[in-house]
Amino acid sequence: MVREFKLPDVGEGVAEGELVSWLVEEGDTVTEDQPVAEVETDKALVEVPSPYNGTVKELRAKEGEMVPVGDVIMVYNVEGEDDLDAVGADEPAEAEEDAAEAAAEEEAEEAPETPSGRVFAPPSARKLARELGVNIENVSGSGPSGRITEQDVRAHADSGGEPEPATAEADASAAEAAAADSGAAEAESASTDSGGSGGQMAQTIQRPEAADREKTLAAPATRQLAKEKGVDINAVPAVEQREGQAFVTPEAVTEYAEAQQQAQQADAQALAAGEDRPREERTPYKGVRKAIGDQMQKSKYTAPHVTHHDEVDVTGLVEARRELKPHAEAKDIKLTYMPFAMKAVTAALKEFPKLNSSLDEENGEIVQKNYYNIGVAAATDAGLMVPVVKDADRKGMLQLSSEMNELVAKARDRSIALDEMQGGTFTITNVGVIGGEYATPIINYPEVGILALGAIKKKPRVVTDENGEDSIEPRHVMTLSLSFDHRIIDGAYAAQFTNKVKEYLSNPKLLLLE
């Protein structure tokens, strides 16, 4: 029997994920719990396991596509069951749609003097074709029912195969026929997700953005026009024409081809002028980068941000860390200043609990948290991530340090679990690690506060001794920047909280009492 596999909920609150890569291909035999795909959410990269033993019949999502949770991404021939059984017997509507699509394909293929329209190739073959600059429609398939394999793509690229030249008369008739009925004889379902675009060598030339679909709605004449111009029709942006569906038009094909040609000419001119790279490069704004941007935007435009700046003499903290560092190394633990800051913040939150809360806007309630889950902002290749150390108030300095180091390492190699980045009540970010002093950090919404630690630098300070005499001495000074949600926190309250953090950092022995 044929079974459908829908994208599961890969984490609390996650509504969709980007299918980064398939780990299997059509025709592969898989076992239950075997990873079949890598999916990137707004938090992490996760492997999706197979729910069945069986054979992969069809991959319904393409690499790079954003897939909503619950959408079918794969179809199986379940082990020991008949392949001829209908998919989703309890879903006649879907069966009727599949039958209608098949009929449309057959009609398109029988149309006189037009191409077949649909190209049968797995995502891996399509990706390879794009990398090799091969028009997938020009490749002859050697697989079952003419399916194109990766070997077919490589063979075509090695042979230097090109589409047959078209006459001006055929070009005109193709465009005319497509214009008369741009939606006639569609053979496939549409996908309008946009992919990445190439670089841009000259500022006056805008490189075309590739739609990078696996399935495209277009009239046979439009497909013929694309073939004549050497354009991959799956890369041409589609436009909405009727009934909410998007089609590729002959005008879009022509515009895309001209833009490609202009961009290539600009590249050639720049290279001839001695430039070794494009003047501008474009990458897709999606995945973790987009999720971070969406979260930052939501926070900034939802919570009225105010940032309180201050500085603290941490000479005693520097000495305490220097003294404790060898003991931590003996236990194979790297001791940084962050665990001290986490302990100081946790102690201060107990005295100023409003900063350990959130605002439930839907119910009109301020939710005060009586637990202390401290997020630590970490810079990764994929963008800013915030691992959360749970119950920080119940852990000692070395345990905090060890757990934090492990979580940050997992965030950077993208192996961190979603629940390890959820449930935070307050966040600390360290801008000092890259030499920064002051910052205006954006609150990790729905939290109401975030503290940025600046670099520790030697500065001259007036020091009063036991006899009340003043002297100027070089001291280790750290800057603090506290951003807070002014709907919940008043400026004076934020300053008092910061003063309490300063007290613990300037005299770290007080942390022994916590």
Image (spheres, rainbow, N blue to C red):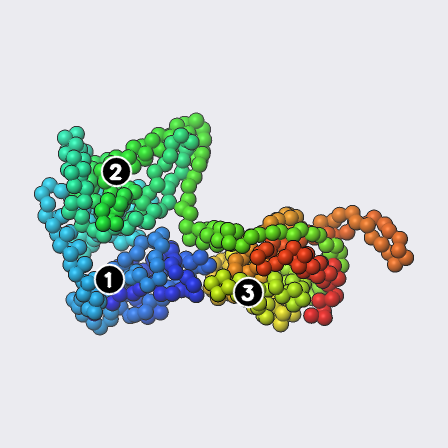
Mark 2 and 1 residues: CB-CB less than 8 Å, in contact?
A: no
Q: Residue at x 26, y 47 (%)?
A: 246
Give the Cα distance between marks 2 and 1: 32 Å
**Residue 100 badge:** none
Query: For this view, does 315 lie left or right of residue 57?
Result: right
* Disc 1 target residue: 57
Mark 2 vs mark 3: which is more N-terminal?
2
* Disc 3 target residue: 366
Comparing 219 with 433, the one in front is 219
Q: Residue at x 39, y 60 (%)?
A: 15
Label 1: element kind: strand
Mark 2 vs mark 1: which is more N-terminal?
1
**Residue 253 badge:** 2
Q: Quadrant of the N terminus?
A: bottom left
x and y percentages locating residue 392 in the rendered image = 61, 68
Q: Nearer the viewer, mark 2 or mark 3?
A: 3
Name the kind of residue labelled 3 in the image.
Answer: Ile
